[in-house]
Amino acid sequence: NAGVTQTPKFQVLKTGQSMTLQCAQDMNHEYMSWYRQDPGMGLRLIHYSVGAGITDQGEVPNGYNVSRSTTEDFPLRLLSAAPSQTSVYFCASSYSSLAEGTDTQYFGPGTRLTVL
Amino acid sequence: AQSVSQHNHHVILSEAASLELGCNYSYGGTVNLFWYVQYPGQHLQLLLKYFSGDPLVKGIKGFEAEFIKSKFSFNLRKPSVQWSDTAEYFCAVLSGNTGKLIFGQGTTLQVKP
């Protein structure tokens, strides 16, 4: 298994540009999430999905869109990039909701995004 | 809303020193708690987790954490740190039953050889 993969690893955008961060997992996980990591703020949830066709907002959803057309893929779209979106973005997945205690959330390697 | 607070933002220790990183959560009901580690240039990895039962949880690489419900705390400990423990450590709480994790601000640990 490749686990959770993210592309690209690095990206530089100009203010106002749009782009899509890709996330894929090959573990047949139903639950997928996007987080952003900023110094001193830990990881904050942007959007999450509990299965194909189902998405919902997290703590900081503004400026981002997601879709979940397949179980494997969960792309994150920046509609009009702003300098405040400069961050490291992590995708994560798990088979279940984690509430049973037997599952683990797996993280991708991250995408470092800079918006000028 | 649930929240997690990590008091120590940057900790510097010498090798063989003991480690304790603080974590407090806000929710008073049933909680599921995690500690993740992020080594330089790598993605997050699970160190340990607490769901129920024994409040002293043992994880990988000699780490352990104690869940103290009365203090809303889940502190991470290691008796003797190594240089290879240099990393950023995150405490997290599971929010609801949708696989959402709420993370603390993180603690950067620097271990001097």
Image: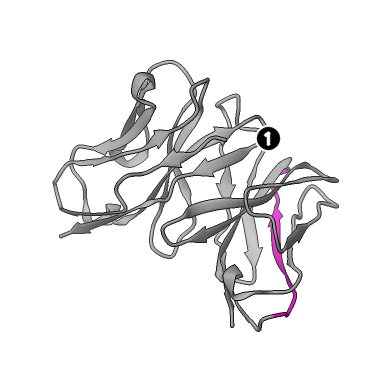
Residue B65 is situated, as x and y percent measured from the top left of the image, at 33, 31
Residue A87 is situated, as x and y percent measured from the top left of the image, at 54, 67
Quadrant in the picture for the C terminus of chain B: bottom left
**Residue at image coords 74%, 74%:** A80
Residue B10 is situated, as x and y percent measured from the top left of the image, at 28, 55
The answer to if B90 sits in the magenta stretch is no
Side (left or right) of A61 relative to A113:
right
Above or below: residue A76 compared with residue A12:
above
Query: Depth check: B108 or B26 in front?
Result: B26
Mark 1 residue element: loop
The answer to if A20 sits in the magenta stretch is yes
Which amino acid type corresponds to the residue marked 1 in the rendered image?
Thr
Q: Mark 1 points at which residue?
A: B98
**Residue at image coords 36%, 44%:** B6
Side (left or right) of B66 relative to B26:
left
The image quarter in which residue A30 lies: top right
**Residue at image coords 64%, 37%:** B99
Above or below: residue A86 compared with residue B13:
below
Query: Depth check: A44 or A88 in front?
Result: A44
**Residue at image coords 75%, 75%:** A18
* Region rendered in magenta: A16-28
